[in-house]
Amino acid sequence: MQEKLKSFFGTDAYFYSFLLVLVALVSFGLGKQSVLPEKATPNTFPAVSTESHRLVPDREVLAAEASATAALGTVIASKSGSKYHLPDCPGAKQIKEANKITFDSVAAAEAAGYTPAANCPGLE
């Protein structure tokens, strides 16, 4: 049978090249199949409604939430800093409890000489 295949390809170089490519493809396919989960169906994803499940909230939503929080009042500042933050901002979470100053409103914080933090959405 090998002689019949060799005569089909013409020369030994073509036959061995084809054989090498064939072995590589079979090895790749078997290797890929060995790492797939047992009952997985490739390229299928569960249907998720984009309306009810957002992975990343919009900037407008974040800004609206921040403005609502700011309108309610409480802002936090550090005794040694010059910026005020909303309670859920990353900067507010980094201030040590001993150094925190709480203001009832944005106006009160600004009257004390504090300015809005740049990393808090909604505080501009």
Image (cartoon, rainbow, N blue to C red):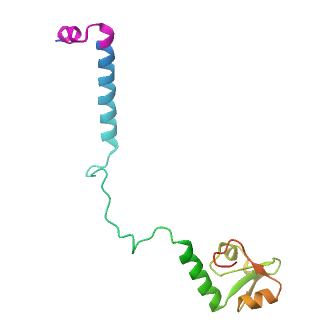
User: What's drawn in magenta, residue-wise?
Assistant: 2-14
Count of marks placed on residues: 0
State the image coordinates of residue 32 (x, y, percent, origin top left). 34, 39
Q: Nearer the viewer, residue 71 or 35?
A: 71
In which image quadrant can residue 54 be found?
bottom left
| In the image, residue 38 above or below residue 66 | above
| In the image, residue 105 above or below residue 56 | below
In which image quadrant can residue 53 be found?
bottom left
Could you tell me which residue is drawn at 66 percent across and 81 percent down?
A: 86
- Quadrant of the snapshot with the N terminus: top left
Q: Nearer the viewer, residue 6 or 1?
A: 6
State the image coordinates of residue 101 (x, y, percent, origin top left). 76, 85
State the image coordinates of residue 71 (x, y, percent, origin top left). 63, 90
| In the image, residue 88 above or below residue 2 | below
Q: Is residue 29 left or right of residue 66?
A: left
- Quadrant of the snapshot with the C terminus: bottom right
Dominant SS in magenta: helix
In which image quadrant can residue 59 be found?
bottom right
In the image, residue 67 lies in the stretch drawn in magenta: no
Could you tell me which residue is drawn at 75 percent across and 81 percent down?
A: 77
Could you tell me which residue is drawn at 81 percent across and 89 percent down?
A: 111
Q: Nearer the viewer, residue 8 or 100?
A: 8
Could you tell me which residue is drawn at 72 percent across and 80 percent down?
A: 97
State the image coordinates of residue 61 (x, y, percent, origin top left). 53, 77
| In the image, residue 90 above or below residue 5 | below
